[in-house]
Amino acid sequence: MFGYADMHRERNALKMSVFEVDYEAAESTLAERTYIRLRDDIITTQLPPGTLLREAELMKRMDVGRTPVREALQRLQYDGFVVVSARRGTFVSKIDINDLTAVYEARARIESWATRLAAERLREFERQEARQLIDELKQTTGPMALEDILALDRRVHRFIYKVAKNPFLFDTLDHYHNLSLRILYVAMKRFPTLVPRLEDVLHDQVLMLEAVCKGDADEAERIAMAHVMSFESEVRKVI
Amino acid sequence: MFGYADMHRERNALKMSVFEVDYEAAESTLAERTYIRLRDDIITTQLPPGTLLREAELMKRMDVGRTPVREALQRLQYDGFVVVSARRGTFVSKIDINDLTAVYEARARIESWATRLAAERLREFERQEARQLIDELKQTTGPMALEDILALDRRVHRFIYKVAKNPFLFDTLDHYHNLSLRILYVAMKRFPTLVPRLEDVLHDQVLMLEAVCKGDADEAERIAMAHVMSFESEVRKVI
DNA sequence: GTGGTTATATATTGCTGATATATTGAAGAT
DNA sequence: ATCTTCAATATATCAGCAATATATAACCAC
């Protein structure tokens, strides 16, 4: 007990949100819920980069005490989503072109490798899960709501991370996923026409999942790299 | 201002310890210093896996209030160094063979890639820094104190991370470095004869740095991978 | 007497509100 | 214009209370 794998399992049983509605029902600490709410608001740019976050204000708005707010802000600081300047203020961190480059560079490399691992390590029961995902993806035609696109994208990625069977890598990639998601939102806010193209991106994932199912590691890795980088180049055009 | 790069720079100006004595002088918050002290104690197994960490006890021992202690423990929780179980206790996390495999697998892959980047992105003034490191490494002969070996190892790795010029990657790799360092300590505690072999490992780093200096990305990547994995296989023998 | 259930005491973290202290920006003196 | 002072504002810290999980002991049925 009390090893990393246990911790990891428990932590992912609930708690991981970004559009997974369960955080209403999630039985966890106030601090945890406050963290998730704030993080999602930052990722979706409802709290845009540069926003001043006052503890007292957040306490009122979220109807919790000082401790949960502080713990949430600190955790966001470690994630890189806010910058705490002692006795000056806490701000939502800014994003620039260098962040875009660095985040996608790292994520593309690490995630494509994880996809290779997934192809090598897929078990039979997971193959069924993959087929189901593929079916869902194929049924999505026509214009979709942004949240649905991203929720589906997230499910596919988290599936891959899980199948790669390395809990540390899972956490690393989930973090990079959140970072790049915020960058995407910032870009979309400035350039709303970006949205429709995202649908095309979903179709890459069918090919990727099929490669994983076939156990074709080279092909899976190649597609994953292209998939992440296609986000990057779409975003780069408008930033 | 307030972007990730600024944050990253500031955070690394002081604060990052593990045997860098500056955390006595470091002008930062109590919570930060408490975090670093506890983390180092956990990494070096002065606080072995499974240890119960009582807030009240730590307050007395470190002569700080509850807030800094709590913030430190939470941060350690996000790092994976402790497991907080509500109203039951906070424990130093355990380590098993799966953690060893997963951490080194991820670190080897990511770090060898970062070393490739470093070889590609090295600037002239950094080449001088590298030469200096190489000289120091070459002068180390005969038996060394464990702390000196690891401090030197750490310096080399952090130099590589820096030259790769991706702040997100830097943080990711620093985290993996801390994780694998603790695993190494746990292994050494069980099998003290491991220590001397570590000296040999340092000599790999000369070759690695020279490859980076030459800009030979393929060679640098290959050596880095072998270097990290040699730690892994040494540790695996005794765990 | 033994096994199992319930009540209670204790230990531990979760949370709150108040206080301490540092930073900032602007008013006022030079 | 420049420096100094001071009030406003923000986080950092503290001490105490609340809530709950766990262990212990008392109790009861058999």
Image: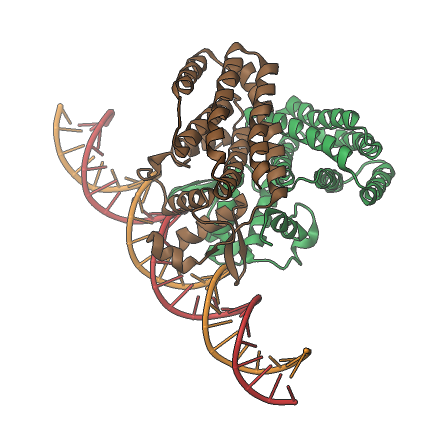
Chain colours: A brown, B green, C red, D orange
Dividing the picture into quarters, in which one does residue B165 lie?
A: top right
Closer to the camera, B136 or B40?
Answer: B136
Closer to the camera, A46 or A32?
Answer: A46
Q: Using residue A8 as the reference point, say whether residue B237 is left or right of it.
A: right
Residue B48 in percent (x, y) is at 56, 38
Residue A183 in percent (x, y) is at 53, 40
Relative height, residue B223 to residue B8 (above, below): above
Dividing the picture into quarters, in which one does residue A116 lie?
A: top right
Relative height, residue B57 to residue B239 (above, below): below
Residue B50 in percent (x, y) is at 50, 36
Relative height, residue A114 to residue D8 (above, below): above
- Name the residue: 66% across, 26% down: B232
Q: Using residue B106 as the reference point, say whether residue B89 is left or right of it.
A: left
Relative height, residue A229 to residue B36 (above, below): above
Image quarter in which the N terminus of chain B is found: bottom right
Closer to the camera, A216 or C2?
Answer: A216
Residue B143 in percent (x, y) is at 81, 36
- Name the residue: 50% across, 23% down: A160
- Name the residue: 70% across, 49% down: B20
Closer to the camera, A37 or A189?
Answer: A189
Image quarter in which the C terminus of chain B is found: top right
- Name the residue: 35% across, 54% down: A61
Dividing the picture into quarters, in which one does residue A142 lie?
A: top left
